[in-house]
Amino acid sequence: MIGLVPGLLSYAREAYDMFPAIDVIRRRLQDLETRMLVAPTRSQIVTDQELVALLPPHAEVERLTQIYFENIDCIYHIIHRSSFDKQYAEFKVAGGQDDVLFVVLVLLIVASALYLTTPTGGLLVDNADAPCDAATVIITSCERWLQTTNLLYNRLVDFQISFLILVSRQLSGRQRKRTWADCGKLIRDFMHAGLHRDPDLLTEAMPLQEKEIRKRLWRAAIEFDLQAAFG
């Protein structure tokens, strides 16, 4: 296709010559796609303990969480920062075994932030793929765990996990052609759970903060679907 547009091929070659990092990124994305295609398709069960073991040290989690809130939460504002920080502080004290869904949420935040980081030395160093590889392992493990767990969508964290799975996949560049279809399924799941309805009109009483997060989750899903449709 690129050869059919006059001058585009020479422009691309010139850009690659001037900015070698562009070609490095392109080749590494192609390599990642190839590795995902040839990877074993047999699902491997991931236990709760294995998920907890994927968490980085607390200091690293807090650093990556800050990156997430500075770069992603400003676009998809679906997590209340103060409530999250409080829950994570309680999670550290408890040792991380009580709420596995919160572990999955933290892991997806960590994975999303890892795609926005590079090792010291930039893209051209030998270990430049390390953060992305670590993020891919985390996302794959979370997906495998969710295959054996039914999200009931009776808690905000269920909706947040479902949405962050899509966001992290998009950041990874994996299965890009499936993004719109996966987002369509997400919206149907959200509608089935009543997320599209105005929480102020529901008979069930809920805190003001939960109402606001539900509204933001629905708007984020619709916005993501619109972007995926043009992708």
Image (cartoon, rainbow, N blue to C red):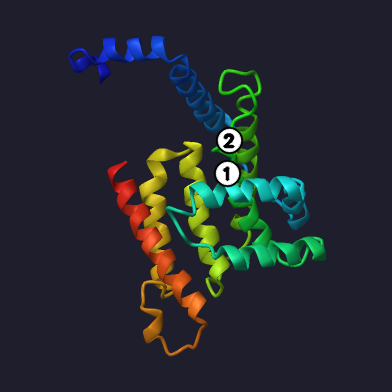
Tag 2, which secondary structure? Answer: loop
Name the mark on residue 19. none
Spatial distance from mark 2 to mark 1, Cα to Cα?
7 Å
Observer-nearest residue: 83 or 210? 83
Relative vertical location of residue 91 with respect to residue 192 in this rendering, above or below: above
Would you name the residue on which mark 2 appears? Answer: 117
- Side (left or right) of 1 relative to 48: left
Going by the numbered disc 1, the residue's amino acid type is Ala
Viewer-proximal residue, 78 or 145? Answer: 78
Query: Which corner quadrant of the image does residue 89 belong to?
Result: bottom right
Relative image position of residue 122 (x, y in whole percent): 58, 23
What percent of the width, then of the height, locates residue 102? 66, 62
Is 114 above or below relative to 23?
below
**Residue lying at 43% horizontally and 15% vertically, measured from the top left:** 19
- Which residue appears at 51% of the width and 84% of the height? 206
Report whether residue 43 is seen. no
Which residue is labeled 1 in the image? 113
Left or right: residue 46 versus residue 76 is: right
